[in-house]
Structure formats: C-alpha cells, structure tokens
C-alpha cells in the first residue's frame, strides 16, 4: 500500500504547482473577459447572454487543454532524474503505474471541474452585484445555468446524462494522459489524449436536453480510452 501511495505522491509532486498556476491564470482570464464584456455591453438581457458574449468558455477550454498537457507529460523522458530514480526504486509494474496515474489525473481534472463550477458561480454573482441595469435575483442565476450551455454543463442540475458524460470524460482523459506518458517512455506514440481533449473542449458547452448526444460522446470517450489502455497492455506483454 505504501508503494501505491508513493506513486500518487510522485505524480502530485510533478504536477501540483504547474496545475495551480494554470488554473489561477484560467480563472483570472475568465474574470477579465467578464469585466470587459460588462464594460462593452450597454445592456445584456440575462446573465447567460453576458457569459456567452464574454467568451469565458474559451478561456476555460484553454485551461483544460493545458491541464491535460501537464498531466500527459508527467513521467515522460523529460521528467526529472529524481522521478526516474523513484520509479526504478519502487519497481512497480508499468501497467499498475499507468492505472494509478490515470486515477491521479482523473482526480486532478475532477478538482478543476469543481473549482471551475464554483468560479463560474462567483463570476455570475459578481456580475449581478455590479450590473448597471435592473437588479438580478437568484432566479436569474438559475435561468443562466439552465440556458447557457457552458454554465449548464458545469452544473447540469438534474440532467443526469450530462453529469455522467462529464464523469466519463474526466476518467477517460486521465487514463489516456497516463497512457501517453507510458508510450513516450517506451519510444512509442500514443496520442489518444489529443483528439479526446479537443473533443471534450469542443463538445462541452452543449445545450439542455441532449441526452442522445451525451451518450454518443460518452461512448466515443470510453472507446478511445479502452483502446489506449489496451495498447499499453499489448506493448507491455510484447516486451515481457
């Protein structure tokens, strides 16, 4: 058990400060975009319109891509000599290492999702407090998270298919990021994380009541992640 804890600690040491910096820059960029949109628009009919016109979702997407990049590069050949030494000393099965780091990656993405949802809620309340027009209320906030695709996907309310899709995206992104570093350490190419992360960003801000699309996207993500994990198992057995 101590060995697995060391694996997680190594991944956290390699990624924590980089992720915190990326997330801080992402949230500051979103705040700046919201403030600029409030100054540019003389009147905005609903919080959802302000969020849409601010293009804050683009900053969030860039933050997600950067987060996936940091997680995927963890454990690659460019890692510190200390990391390589620790991996050799632990003598961990590389398949186990990949799954553990996949879980670590998924947890990091879950934290980012939760922090992004809380920050979006703060930005909306900030806009409500500084609106020059008729004051907004809690119903305005509820409608914004119902009507705007980006806000609704962050907090799907009672649309369970969207919450499940998000969870599957997090798990699959985490696994494919870990598979990328495994393939890179062994001189191979495993780029499943690239199309999957782009698909996540492009399709994230869907509208309400699109369960069929959520199911289809979940299936694509699961298929992509399963293929990446299978390649790790196959390559491991070929080298054994």
Image (cartoon, rainbow, N blue to C red):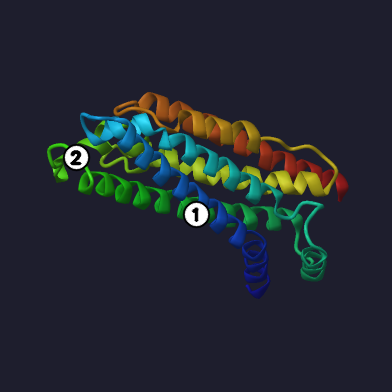
* Residue 39 x/y as whole percent: 32, 36
Residue 199 falls left or right of residue 79: left
Residue 66's spot in the image, x, y percent? 60, 44
Quadrant in which residue 16 is drawn = bottom right
Query: For mark 2, what is the residue?
Result: 132
**Residue at the limit of the structure toward the bottom, as seen here:** 2
Please state, as top left, top right, bottom left or bottom right, where the N terminus lies in the image: bottom right
Residue 78: % across, % down:
80, 53
Residue sitting nearer the eye, 177 or 64: 64
Q: Kindly report the distance in space between the C-alpha atoms of the residues bearing marks 2 and 1.
A: 28 Å
Mark 2 or 1, which is nearer the eye?
A: 2
N-terminal-most mark, 2 or 1: 1
Q: Give left or right: position of 194 versus 165.
A: right
Q: Quadrant of residue 12?
A: bottom right
**Residue 24: numbered disc:** 1
Work out whether 79 lies above or below 10: above
Tag 2 secondary structure: loop
- The residue shown at (53%, 43%) is 64
Tell me whether the residue at label 2 lies in contact with that at label 1, contact meaning CB atoms closer than 8 angstroms.
no
Q: Is residue 36 visible from the viewing direction of this image?
A: yes
> Could you say whether the residue bearing mark 1 is in a helix, strand or loop?
helix
Displayed quadrant of residue 166: top left
């Amino acid at each position: 058990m101590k060995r697995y804890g060391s694996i997680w600690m190594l991944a956290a040491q390699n990624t924590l400060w980089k992720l915190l910096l990326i997330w801080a820059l992402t949230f500051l960029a979103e705040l700046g975009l919201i403030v600029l949109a409030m100054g540019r628009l003389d009147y905005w009919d609903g919080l959802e319109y302000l969020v849409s016109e601010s293009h804050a979702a683009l900053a969030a997407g860039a933050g997600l891509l950067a987060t996936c990049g940091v997680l995927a590069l963890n454990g690659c050949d460019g890692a510190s000599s200390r990391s390589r030494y620790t991996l050799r000393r632990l003598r961990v099965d590389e398949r186990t290492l990949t799954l553990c780091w996949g879980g670590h990656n998924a947890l990091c993405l879950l934290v980012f999702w939760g922090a992004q949802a809380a920050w979006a809620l703060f930005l909306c309340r900030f806009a409500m407090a500084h609106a020059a027009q008729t004051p907004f209320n809690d119903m305005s906030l509820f409608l914004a998270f119902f009507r705007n695709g980006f806000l609704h996907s962050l907090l799907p309310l009672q649309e369970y298919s969207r919450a499940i899709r998000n969870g599957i995206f997090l798990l699959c992104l985490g696994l494919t990021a870990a598979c990328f570093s495994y393939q890179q350490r062994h001189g191979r190419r495993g780029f499943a994380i690239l199309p999957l992360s782009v698909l996540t960003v492009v399709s994230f801000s869907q509208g309400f009541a699109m369960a069929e699309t959520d199911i289809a996207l979940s299936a694509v993500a699961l298929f992509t992640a399963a293929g990446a994990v299978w390649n790790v198992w196959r390559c491991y057995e070929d080298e054994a």
